[in-house]
Structure formats: C-alpha cells, structure tokens
Image: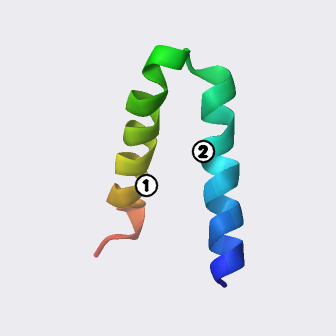
Amino acid sequence: MTAALGAGSGATFAPVAQIAPADKVGSVTGLIGATGGLGDPSRRR
C-alpha cells in the first residue's frame, strides 16, 4: 500500500516541475497539496 501511495504522489507532483515555471514550482506544489488535503467535498457527510 505504501508503494502505491508513493507512486501516486510521484505521478501527481512529477509533472509540476515540467509544466510550471521554475520560480513557481513551490507555490504550485503547495496548492496541489492543499487541494488534496481538502479532499472530495462530495464525499463529506
């Protein structure tokens, strides 16, 4: 399970370095992490 979570995280964050400008990578990564921390609002009770 740990390997799958690590692979999923890598698949999410790896393209950021290629897509985002170099000076914005930290900000974009933070936004992605924060969005993931919020979760799926449709699944909340």
Foreground mark, 2 or 1, reads 2
Q: Earlier in the sequence, mark 2 or mark 1?
A: 2
Quarter-of-image position of residue 10? bottom right
Q: Amino acid type of disc 2? A: Phe
Provide the residue designation for mark 2: 13
Does 18 sit above or below residue 14?
A: above
- Looking at this rendering, what residue extends furthest in the bottom direction? 1
Residue 8, horizontal then vertical, whole percent: 67, 61
Secondary structure beneath dot 1 equals helix
Quarter-of-image position of residue 3? bottom right
Q: CA distance from mark 2 to mark 1?
A: 12 Å
Q: Residues within 10 Å of mark 1 (few under 14, many from 20)?
A: few
Residue 13, horizontal then vertical, whole percent: 60, 44
Q: Amino acid type of disc 1? A: Gly
Q: Quadrant of the N terminus?
A: bottom right
Residue 12, horizontal then vertical, whole percent: 63, 48
Q: Residues within 10 Å of mark 2 (few under 14, many from 20)?
A: some
Is 13 left, or right, of 23 in this rendering? Answer: right
Residue 20, horizontal then vertical, whole percent: 57, 21
Residue at (60%, 32%) from the top-left corner? 16
Q: Quadrant of the C terminus?
A: bottom left
Q: Are marks 2 and 1 in contact (CB under 8 Å)?
A: no
Residue at (54%, 17%) from the top-left corner? 22
Provide the residue designation for mark 1: 36
Secondary structure beneath dot 2 equals helix
Residue at (38%, 38%) from the top-left corner? 31
Does 16 sit above or below residue 21?
A: below
